[in-house]
Image (tube, helix red, strand yellow):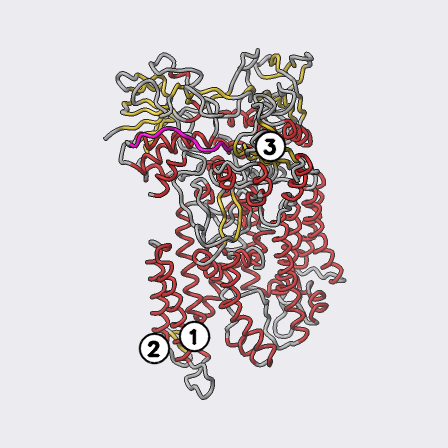
């Protein structure tokens, strides 16, 4: 029986394993050094905040794996010998595979800051990071202040986490507005204000120079690059993006770039070795997507796709319309299609922006300035229906159609105030198409 | 991993997160209010009962209100679940168990030893706790309080005060606010005030909470109750007819249109308490597959029991001779069997596919009921059915289901089993509504395409123990008989994945293998297989 070995028990690897099991009788092993069972990484924050216990982040009960004949091995793969199809574990043992899938995800970026390896400096990615945070920041008596470096999705989540335990937070963001490499200006600025409303000390256009240590090797303070200001703190969160977690493959014959290089079939240069999820790097980007897509949904899609290939129905990774979501403290964010921030925005892309007077809801609709084709939407504080936008994108609707039919896409709970009329009015005013 | 539960025995600091000084004062205020009730329980003779009763209930309400305002209004609108799994009381810690024991004890005394609460028997005046409530009862309906009046008052105060707290907690969510106002209204009006006023207008009518429908209201068709209605002319007859129409006509129509939520989380008193006072315990319900299996057996067993028991009760006071009253024992038993057969046949004909493996269990259940009814008919004498005294069946149901299951376990175990263990495992009304909801309803919780991140907030907050995530992460709508439509899963979802809605029956149940957002050809290929 063919032995499929998956390194990594995240959403990509587990989705792949489940689908292979549905399609075949192959022997499946999932390897992880992080945890015994699959858990939802995106839910780690809720464990620290006390909304859930760690076991609640596990989407499948523990009996699920045995019942579906998916073997779980806890171990750290030290290196991969592709010629003999052998994995060597740090613990000393080995494992043979027939097909190998690398689904090892990411690790937090560190940019060589002085002091970045001190006690109390951590990313927020692995379960071990959470344990580390619990140790160094259990409450505001042990941790008088935390400094977060890096203004992205993980950074703001970490800020929300620390806030829930009333630990004062200073949030250093390199850009001049939160996440404005991705978000258009109006949205980004609204989130700036929301962060400050949560009493978080948001510092824009601010870089970290170094992290200072006390006599025991613990974090004592950080120094700001621009001003030289010293901010005393006990914890430093490094959340300046992630990189593929593939150091263990250096020295193997598998071609690496920033991630594991794969073609559209998610195959590496070595036959019977594949890579999916955060750690896979496409030779060429697919459409507007990045070559490395470190997103939950794309990891799952690659798993769904590769299962077909492994079970004999060779299929390209051909994702549909882009979508994503996040939550910035209390403000939910969804996006369908493409809406670019100020940087990297194609010349033909124009925006319609509407913001509610309460400063917690807004939408931005991107369209082609000549053809008026609808390109995408960002929505904050208003839930929208994925299926509706997916259909409109497929049907290549124009912005007029979308604006006049926006209520069909509303996904807010019943009895919520509706804003479609107000939005349409603003649209007609701004674009004078009425 | 230190996602530690605080199982510390320290009474001074049971919480991971400290509460503010204002909250401590509020807590103390509420406890003083409760302490007055405890003093009354131990027969402290208050000089002015009306004053001390008002003081007690007032302090309790003010304590809860001040606490809630400080907890929620000092923060921005949003989800307020910080620390629920750290707090001893809401994570089965020491405080949780202490509160559980106190509540359970209260229910045992209430149901079985009301004399300890001060109920005066044989015409003697009430003393103790019940005595304290006499002035309010006299004010409302000019009679002394009973243990049920005390219970009803405390129940109503709890729903109103904790309802206010819940409204503040979800002040960004109009569905939650309107729903909570609804349960507060139905408790205060229908369960508490209207029955008192009905008594004032007509002292012979049996107590009737109009929104309490058979089989939840298992005593409505008891002989004393039916006689009570029938001996009171048209109004009594109207009320009795309303009771029958409620379950056979109103309920199916509303459940078809809105799902069982119209009752369970908008109207029902048990649900009302669970949604308000029980809100802090909703996360404690078990989401395990094994719990779901137990649930299905238990709740349907209770349903069978209640149907057979009610039929038997009515049967015993019907006559044999149609000259006395057209509804004789023979006609009645035929009607019941005919009705059940009709329902069973219709379901098997129209919904056989949807039921899958469960069809077998449904059939077993049906034939057990029919067999029981026939055995009853042929073993029935004037005062015996199943060779046992007729009243014994009814009192067994009353004690074990009506009192122990719904009260002692259902509410007393809030801090251990979560807030809806009665609704989930025991309520025969919930079973009937759930059956309708699963098979004939426009209601579902729609899953938003591929947006789920499997975080588990939805499952965690489901008081009915539904593993919501298991559906959401498959892109499958949630159509479950147990769902009471409280909407909290949708509220806590960080990615806007869940929406409660009433839509067409078509495509309501939509299991998918590949979620929206992936390759359309792959979706076509896999999802159609």
**What residue is rendered at 41% in x and 32% in y?**
A301
User: Residue B258, how many percent across, how many down?
Assistant: 53, 56
Q: Nearer the viewer, mark 2 or mark 1?
A: 2
Where residue B132 sits, quadrant-wise, is bottom right
Q: Which residue is mark 1?
A: B390
Q: Which residue is mark 2?
A: B378
Q: In the rendered image, is residue B6 in sight? A: no
**What residue is rendered at 46% in x and 42% in y?**
B472
Q: Are marks 3 and 2 in contact (CB under 8 Å)?
A: no
Q: Secondary structure at mark 1?
A: helix
- What secondary structure is the stretch in magenta mostly built from? loop
- Magenta residues, as a range? A313-323
Q: Does residue A172 appear left or right of residue B405 in this picture? A: right
Q: Which residue is mark 3?
A: A328
Q: Secondary structure at mark 2?
A: helix
Where residue A62 sits, quadrant-wise, is top left
Nearest the eye: A214 or A333: A333
> Mark 2 — on which chain does it sit?
B
User: Residue A366, how many percent across, how many down?
Assistant: 58, 31
Q: How many residues crowd around disc 2 within 10 Å: few (fewer than 14), some, or many (20 or more)?
A: few
Q: Nearer the viewer, mark 1 or mark 3?
A: 3
Give how far apart the Cα atoms at labels 1 and 3 are: 63 Å
């Amino acid at each position: 029986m063919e032995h499929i070995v998956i390194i990594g028990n995240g959403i990509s690897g587990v989705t792949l394993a489940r689908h292979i099991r549905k399609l075949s009788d192959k022997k499946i092993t999932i390897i992880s050094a992080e945890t015994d069972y699959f858990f939802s990484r995106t839910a780690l924050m809720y464990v620290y905040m006390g909304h859930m216990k760690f076991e609640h982040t596990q989407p499948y009960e523990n009996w699920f794996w045995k019942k579906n004949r998916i073997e779980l091995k806890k171990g750290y793969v030290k290196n991969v010998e592709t010629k003999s199809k052998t994995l060597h574990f740090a613990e000393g043992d080995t494992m043979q595979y027939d097909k190998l899938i690398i689904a090892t995800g990411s690790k937090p970026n560190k940019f060589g800051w002085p002091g970045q390896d001190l006690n109390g400096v951590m990313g927020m990615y692995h379960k071990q990071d959470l344990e580390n945070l619990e140790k160094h920041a259990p409450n505001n008596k042990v941790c008088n202040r935390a400094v977060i470096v890096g203004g992205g999705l993980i950074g703001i989540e970490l800020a929300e986490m620390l806030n829930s335990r009333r630990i004062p937070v200073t949030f250093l963001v390199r850009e001049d507005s939160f996440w404005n490499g991705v978000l258009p200006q109006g949205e980004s600025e609204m989130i700036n204000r929301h962060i400050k409303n949560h009493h978080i000390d948001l510092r824009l256009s601010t870089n970290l120079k170094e992290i200072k240590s006390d006599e025991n090797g613990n974090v004592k303070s950080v120094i700001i690059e621009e001003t030289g200001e010293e901010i005393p703190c006990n914890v430093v969160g490094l959340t300046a993006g992630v990189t593929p977690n593939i150091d263990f493959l250096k020295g193997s014959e598998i071609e690496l770039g920033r991630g594991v290089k794969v073609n559209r079939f998610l195959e590496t240069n070595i036959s019977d070795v594949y890579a999916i999820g955060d750690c896979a790097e496409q030779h060429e980007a697919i459409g507007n997507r990045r070559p490395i897509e470190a997103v939950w949904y794309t990891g799952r899609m690659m798993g769904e796709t590769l299962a077909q290939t492994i079970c004999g129905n060779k299929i390209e990774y051909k994702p549909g319309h882009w979508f994503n979501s996040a939550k910035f403290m209390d403000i939910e964010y969804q996006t369908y299609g493409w809406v670019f921030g100020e940087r990297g925005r194609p010349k033909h892309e124009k925006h319609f922006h509407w913001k509610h007077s309460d400063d917690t809801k807004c939408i931005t609709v991107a369209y082609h300035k000549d053809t008026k084709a609808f390109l995408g939407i960002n929505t904050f504080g208003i839930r929208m229906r994925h299926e509706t936008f997916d259909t409109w994108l497929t049907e290549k609707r124009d912005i007029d159609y979308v604006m006049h039919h926006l209520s069909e896409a509303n996904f807010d709970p019943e009895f919520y105030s509706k804003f479609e009329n107000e939005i349409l009015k603003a649209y007609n005013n701004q674009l004078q198409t009425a | 991993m230190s996602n530690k539960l605080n199982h510390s025995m320290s009474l001074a600091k049971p919480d991971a997160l400290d509460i503010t000084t204002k909250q401590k004062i509020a807590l103390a205020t509420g406890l003083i209010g409760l302490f007055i009730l405890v003093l009354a329980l131990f027969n402290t003779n208050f000089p002015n009962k009306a004053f001390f009763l008002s003081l007690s209930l007032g302090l309790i309400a003010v304590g809860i209100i001040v606490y809630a305002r400080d907890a929620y209004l000092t923060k921005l609108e949003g989800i307020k679940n910080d620390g629920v799994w750290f707090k001893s009381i809401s994570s089965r810690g020491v405080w949780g168990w202490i509160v559980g024991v106190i509540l359970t004890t209260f229910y045992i005394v209430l149901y079985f030893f009301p004399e300890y609460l001060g109920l005066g028997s044989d015409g003697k005046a009430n003393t103790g706790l019940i005595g304290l409530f006499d002035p309010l009862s006299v004010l409302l309906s000019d009679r002394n309080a009973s243990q049920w009046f005390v219970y009803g008052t405390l129940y109503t105060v709890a729903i109103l005060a904790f309802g206010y707290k819940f409204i503040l907690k979800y002040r960004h969510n109009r569905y939650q606010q309107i729903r909570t106002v609804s349960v507060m209204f139905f408790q205060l009006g229908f369960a508490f005030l209207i029955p008192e006023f009905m008594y004032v207008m007509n002292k012979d009518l049996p107590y009737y909470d109009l929104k309490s429908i058979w089989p939840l209201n298992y005593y409505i068709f008891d002989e004393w109750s039916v006689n009570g209605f029938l001996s009171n002319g048209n109004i009594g007859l109207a009320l009795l007819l309303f009771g029958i129409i409620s379950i056979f006509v109103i309920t199916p129509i509303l459940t078809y249109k809105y799902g069982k939520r119209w009752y369970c989380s908008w109207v029902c008193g048990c649900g009302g308490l669970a949604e308000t006072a029980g809100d802090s315990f909703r996360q404690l319900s078990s989401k395990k597959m094994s719990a779901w299996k137990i649930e299905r057996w238990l709740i349907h067993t209770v349903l069978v029991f209640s149907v057979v028991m009610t039929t038997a009760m009515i049967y015993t006071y019907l006559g044999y001779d149609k000259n006395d009253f057209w509804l004789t024992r023979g006609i009645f038993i035929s009607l019941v069997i005919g009705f059940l057969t009709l329902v069973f046949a219709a379901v098997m004909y129209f919904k056989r596919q949807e039921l899958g493996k469960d069809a077998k269990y449904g059939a077993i259940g049906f034939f057990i009921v029919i067999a029981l009814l026939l055995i009853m008919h042929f073993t029935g004498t004037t005062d015996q059915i199943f060779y046992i005294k007729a009243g014994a069946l009814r009192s067994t149901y009353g004690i074990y289901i009506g009192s122990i299951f719904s009260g002692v376990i259902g509410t007393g175990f809030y801090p251990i089993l979560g807030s809806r263990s009665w609704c989930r495992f025991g309520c025969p009304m919930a079973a009937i509504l759930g059956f309708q909801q699963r098979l004939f309803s426009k209601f579902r919780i729609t899953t938003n395409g591929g947006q789920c991140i499997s975080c588990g907030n939805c499952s965690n907050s489901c008081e009915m123990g539904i593993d919501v995530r298991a559906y959401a992460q498959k892109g499958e709508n949630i159509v479950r008989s147990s769902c009471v439509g409280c909407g909290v899963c949708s509220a806590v979802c960080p990615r806007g994945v869940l929406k409660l809605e009433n839509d067409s029956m078509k495509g309501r149940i939509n299991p998918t293998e590949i979620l929206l957002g992936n390759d359309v050809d792959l979706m076509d290929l896999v999802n159609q297989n």
